[in-house]
């Protein structure tokens, strides 16, 4: 376990998260309050939001927080 603050999303009455092939809806970079540069990707599966993935760039040992809203910017690969 990397300690990344990734969030699995469940919509409506669904009891479990959706797994399988995902479509990237948004791809951002930002800075956490601890000063760690992170990537943030919003995934959809089967037409529903499924995951907000947050990962350190480069990889970091241990947990860290979510990026501040002010620091978020679209990644060049997703514009």
Image (cartoon, grey):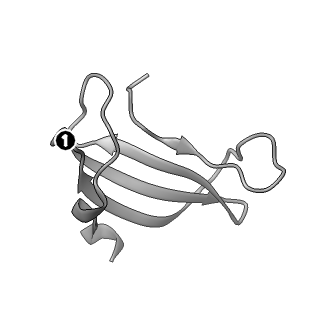
Q: Where is residue 63 in the image (x, y as percent from the top left)?
A: 33, 27
Q: Quadrant of residue 54?
A: top left
Q: Which quarter shows the N terminus?
A: top left
Question: How far across and down, in percent of the image, does residue 75 sit?
Answer: 28, 66
Q: Residue at x 33, y 62 (%)?
A: 28
Quarter of the rendering occupied by the C terminus: bottom left
Asked if residue 25 lies left or right of residue 48, the reply is left
Q: Residue furthest bottom?
A: 79
Q: Tell me the element at label 1.
A: loop
Q: In this view, does 62 lie above or below 52?
A: above
Residue 3 in the image: state x and y as whole percent. Answer: 38, 27
Residue at the extreme left: 35
Mark 1, other Cα within 10 Å: few <14 / some 14–19 / many ≥20: some
Relative horizontal placement of residue 74, taking residue 25 as reference (left or right): left
User: Residue drawn at (25%, 70%), measured in percent from left and top?
Assistant: 76
Question: Is 72 displayed left or right of 23 in the figure?
Answer: left
Q: Quadrant of residue 73?
A: bottom left
- Is 55 rendered above or below residue 51? above
Name the residue rendered at 39%, 34% in the picture.
4
Provide residue 55's location: percent of width, then percent of height. 34, 42
Q: Would you place residue 63 above or below residue 24 in this image?
A: above
Q: What residue would you read off at disc 1? A: 36
Residue at (63% x, 49% y) in the render = 9
């Amino acid at each position: 376990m990397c300690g990344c603050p990734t969030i699995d999303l469940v919509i409506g009455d669904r009891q479990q998260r959706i797994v399988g092939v995902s479509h990237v809806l948004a791809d951002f970079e930002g800075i956490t309050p601890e000063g760690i540069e992170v990537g943030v990707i919003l995934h959809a599966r089967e037409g529903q939001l499924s995951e907000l993935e947050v990962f350190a760039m480069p990889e970091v040992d241990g947990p860290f927080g979510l990026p501040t809203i002010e620091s978020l910017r679209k990644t060049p690969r997703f514009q």
